[in-house]
Amino acid sequence: MGSTKNLGLVIRGEDIFQEEDYGKPISERLSQILRRNVSKNDYANIAIRSNVSFSTIRDVVYRTNSLTKSNATAICLLMHAAFENSMAYKLRAEADIIFLNNLLNV
């Protein structure tokens, strides 16, 4: 669902993460948000774009691998995809509410 291609956007790990974030798993909250809002296709597309393996990205998201400077760009791209996806889910939910409200005459 997330479309991170052709954005002209450069996302760099050093712009989002601080030095003390490296060498540790990402936060539980970020992990939950990413798991909830990205698909396997997002993982695959970001793995290709960032030259970080699908399994490394997955392991960082599931907190079984630490954030490193080499995988941080992939995680930042995943965060961007999660943001786009969550906005799309919100818009779709709002449209569904309006539709159902009209059907139910609430």
Image (cartoon, grey):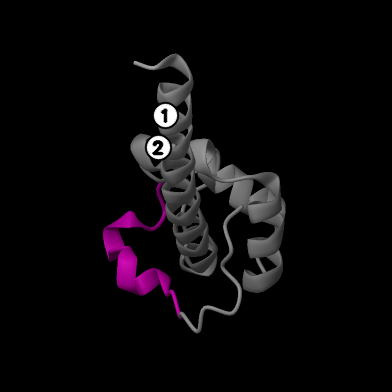
In the rendered image, the vertical position of residue 52 relative to residue 67, given as above or below: below
* Place of residue 88 in the rendered image (x, y in percent of width and height, measured from the top left): 48, 49
* Place of residue 33 in the rendered image (x, y in percent of width and height, measured from the top left): 42, 39
Q: 48 and 38: which one is in front?
A: 38
Q: Residue at x 32, y 66 (%)?
A: 16
In the rendered image, the vertical position of residue 86 relative to residue 28, given as above or below: below
1 and 2 marks in contact (CB < 8 Å): yes
- As measured in the structure, the alpha-carbon distance from the residue carrying label 1 to the one carrying label 2 is 5 Å
Q: Amino acid at mark 1?
A: Ile
Q: 66 and 10: which one is in front?
A: 10
Q: Is residue 23 magenta?
A: yes
Q: Is residue 35 left or right of residue 20?
A: right
The part of the chain drawn in magenta is: 10-25
For disc 1, the marked residue is 97
Q: Residue at x 40, y 48 (%)?
A: 24
Q: Residue at x 35, y 36 (%)?
A: 29
Q: Quadrant of the C terminus?
A: top left
Q: Amino acid at mark 2?
A: Glu
In the rendered image, the vertical position of residue 95 relative to residue 70, given as above or below: above
